[in-house]
Image (spheres, rainbow, N blue to C red):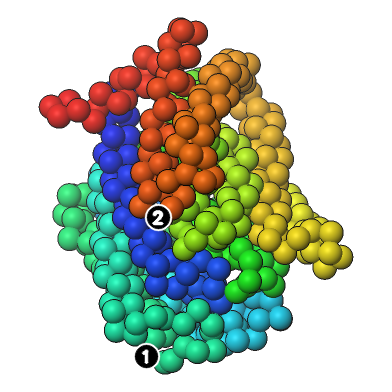
Amino acid sequence: MSSLGRASAVIAAGTMVSRVTGLLRSIVLVGVLGSISQAADAFTVANQLPNSVFQLISVGVLTAVIVPQIVKATAKPDGGGAFISKMFTLGVVVLLICTAIAMIAAPGLVWLATSEKQQELRALATALAYWCLPQILFYGVYALLGETFNARRIFGPFTWAPVVNNVVSIAGFLALGALFGNVPTRAAAWTPEMTAMLGGTATLGIILQALVLLIFWRRTGLSLRPDFRWRGAGLGTVGRLAGWTLLMALAGIAAGFFQTSIATAVSGTDASTTVMANAWLVFMLPYSVIVLSIGTPYFTQISEHAAAGRDDEVRADISRSIRTLVFFIMAAIAAVAAATLPASRVFTRSIDETFAAAPVLIAYLIGLLPLTILFIVQRTFYAYDDTRTPFWFTILQCALVVGTALLASFLYTADVLPPSLLAAAVALGQSLASTVQTLLAIWLLHRKIGGLQIGSWMLSIGRFALAAIPAAAAGWGVFLLMGGDEGWTLKSQLFGALGTCIIGVAVVVVYIGILALLRAPELKVAGSMLRRFLPGR
């Protein structure tokens, strides 16, 4: 447990710094481009393309396949060095090919991700995409190296490297504003120089993020060299397992493109893709700091126990990890719910934009608890080399995402849904789909290995919810005491951030106090993990 605590502390600290600098990056970008803006939405679409394509070809494969395979390879006499070199070489070759294909297909990708009503936005997004799509290669290199670090239980470099990307991006965005003054929000008013500076800065940050990991590679104790002798290296297993994850990622990307194309219909006038991206960033802050930092070491441990055939320990890992994760995540849900308006103000230029963005954040927040549980459940399937089952419950989720987005579009077109709530409706559909996906995934995993101790961790979740509701109410009361929607917390981005922190502290204090009165056993586990952050621990 102590090693898990130390690993979680390292990941949480790096993730926190990374996410905070990521928040600053988005704040600076909003200051330069705005949040309800064609230019901002065009950049959001273009910069999300490499993330989407990379997810298609790499993230699912790495998460689902590479970590368990590296864990198994480390049992070999060379510690898995030969396997990793072959895997890395093959990965870079595939990434180069996919990057080239994506560059050629850039206009088509932008067309899929934008509304036909926004031709000017499409033109700017396409120009920016040519600058952003090379990120696919460097995202891939970063992930290949980083997942190897994780599998070797070296969690620091992979977690801290994104800070470099954020710092470079912040500098570039500030330079854009300084050089071009009031950057136009209309897509048609952009010049090639503006496009090159914005897109080039975004890609430079990803390049440096990947190079940072190479500097720390020596810590793995493995040699890394090009090796094209792929036959007989066991990569066939990787390919077989990766096939399902590629199909799963493709379905997810298609659903995401469809959501974006629906939301961009109101770009420039109401909350659209940039507001959704910023709301997702706030949503992902607790997910990344809590779920990834605690869940990633658990995933490595689950993979080790599954590889050794120790199913009872896997079941215990699942129950313990879910209870620990939900303990923290429930407090985050209560805090963000209470601080929705101040938190949204951080990423908007005006109070009117804040009220447009807040419903999107609330809609995403509904899905935070299911996604937290899904993280462990889905990765348990991966630990057993089962990528086919996650494919099927993800297909259901994608179908629901598309169906709810279609419903939102129909209601908007029929003048039943106001344009200001279109993005929120799309986000709500995402959360509802994730909830159904998680319930199905739990049922399927129970059928697969049984004995998930669902009753024990559902009892814990109920206890956490019992504490979170009054804690959120207390946080909302603090917001009202600070003036509510006419108070100082909505006067500026800085005040919004400060108000969010104050509300968050109030929520956590009440939440912990109630759980202490209930004598929740998870408090001891949480306290043990938090003590890992203290000097000398």
**Does the rendering let one see residue 82?**
no
- In this orientation, which residue lies closer to the viewer: 449 or 443? 443
Quarter the N terminus occupies: top left
- Which mark sits nearer the N-terminus, 2 or 1? 1
Q: Residue furthest bottom?
A: 192
Query: Residue 452: image x %, image y %?
Result: 59, 22
Query: Residue 383: image x %, image y %?
Result: 49, 39
Q: Amino acid at mark 1?
A: Glu
The secondary element bearing badge 1 is classed as helix
**Mark 1, residue position:** 193
Quarter the C terminus occupies: top left
Vertically, is 149 above or below 233?
Answer: above
- In this orientation, which residue lies closer to the viewer: 479 or 370? 479
**Mark 2, residue position:** 493
Which numbered tag is attached to residue 65? none
- In this orientation, which residue lies closer to the viewer: 283 or 203? 283
Q: Quadrant of residue 304?
A: top left
**Does the rendering let one see residue 26?**
yes
Q: Residue at x 52, y 46 (%)?
A: 486
Q: Quadrant of residue 180?
A: bottom left
Q: Quadrant of residue 82?
A: bottom left
Q: In this image, 77 relative to 474: left or right?
A: left
CA neighbours of label 1 inside 10 A, class few (<14), some (14 to 19), many (20+): few
Vertically, is 13 above or below 21?
Answer: above
Q: Residue furthest left?
A: 536
CA neighbours of label 2 inside 10 A, class few (<14), some (14 to 19), many (20+): many
Q: Amino acid at mark 2?
A: Gln
Q: In this image, 68 relative to 107: left or right?
A: left
Q: Nearer the viewer, mark 2 or mark 1?
A: 2
The secondary element bearing badge 2 is classed as helix
Q: Residue at x 66, y 54 (%)?
A: 424
